[in-house]
Amino acid sequence: QVQLVESGGGLVQPGGSLRLSCAASGIIFSTYTMGWYRQAPGKQRELVASITSGVSTDYVDSVKGRFTISRDNAKNTVYLQMNSLKPEDSAVYYCNGKRTIPKRDYWGQGTQVTVSS
């Protein structure tokens, strides 16, 4: 049974930091591209950051220089370090794991991030 379990969300003031974690089980973690998505009320889900099995990373423009995605294959965990948080970063953040051959696409349950004073 595949599980992606996020943690680390919460309420933080503007300018603050949070680190999200996503622990995976039931998959060969090192072979998956892992990503963090977010969805704010009334908006579409968007890809925030991704990291391939080869450790190449990509970010949406709005978080470049503030967020860092990383992975620890020994712990089957992907992280999202979020610094200089802004109110517009508030959303439910979802962990995603995917691979193309064979095609697999898994989601976590989401963790709420709220940036507010």
Image (cartoon, rainbow, N blue to C red):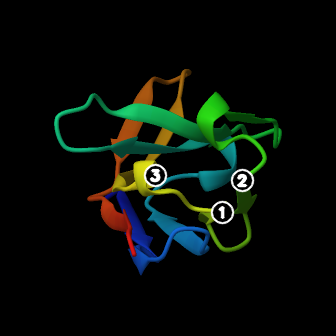
- Under tag 2, what secondary structure? loop
Residue closest to the eye, 74 or 59: 59
Q: Give the alpha-carbon distance from disc 3 to disc 1, as whole Å.
A: 10 Å
Q: Give the alpha-carbon distance from disc 3 to disc 2, as whole Å.
A: 11 Å
In the image, residue 11 lies at what x, y percent?
38, 78
Under mark 2, the amino acid is Arg
Q: Is residue 83 left or right of residue 110?
A: right
Under mark 1, the amino acid is Ser
Q: Is residue 46 left or right of residue 28?
A: left
Residue closest to the eye, 87 or 17: 87
Viewer can see residue 60: no
Residue denoted by label 1: 84
**Going from the N terminus, do you reach mark 3 or mark 1 first?**
1
The answer to which quarter of the image holds residue 63 is: top right
Q: Is residue 71 left or right of residue 5?
A: right
Q: Are marks 2 and 1 in contact (CB under 8 Å)?
A: yes
Q: On residue 89, which mark appears?
A: 3
Disc 2 packing (10 Å; few <14; some 14–19; many ≥20): few
Q: Give the alpha-carbon distance from disc 2 to disc 1, as whole Å.
A: 6 Å
Under mark 3, the amino acid is Asp
Q: Are marks 3 and 1 in contact (CB under 8 Å)?
A: no
Residue furthest front as drawn: 117
Residue denoted by label 2: 66
Disc 3 packing (10 Å; few <14; some 14–19; many ≥20): many
Task: Relative to 78, say whether 40 is above or below.
Answer: above
Viewer can see residue 71: yes
| The N terminus, quarter of image | bottom left
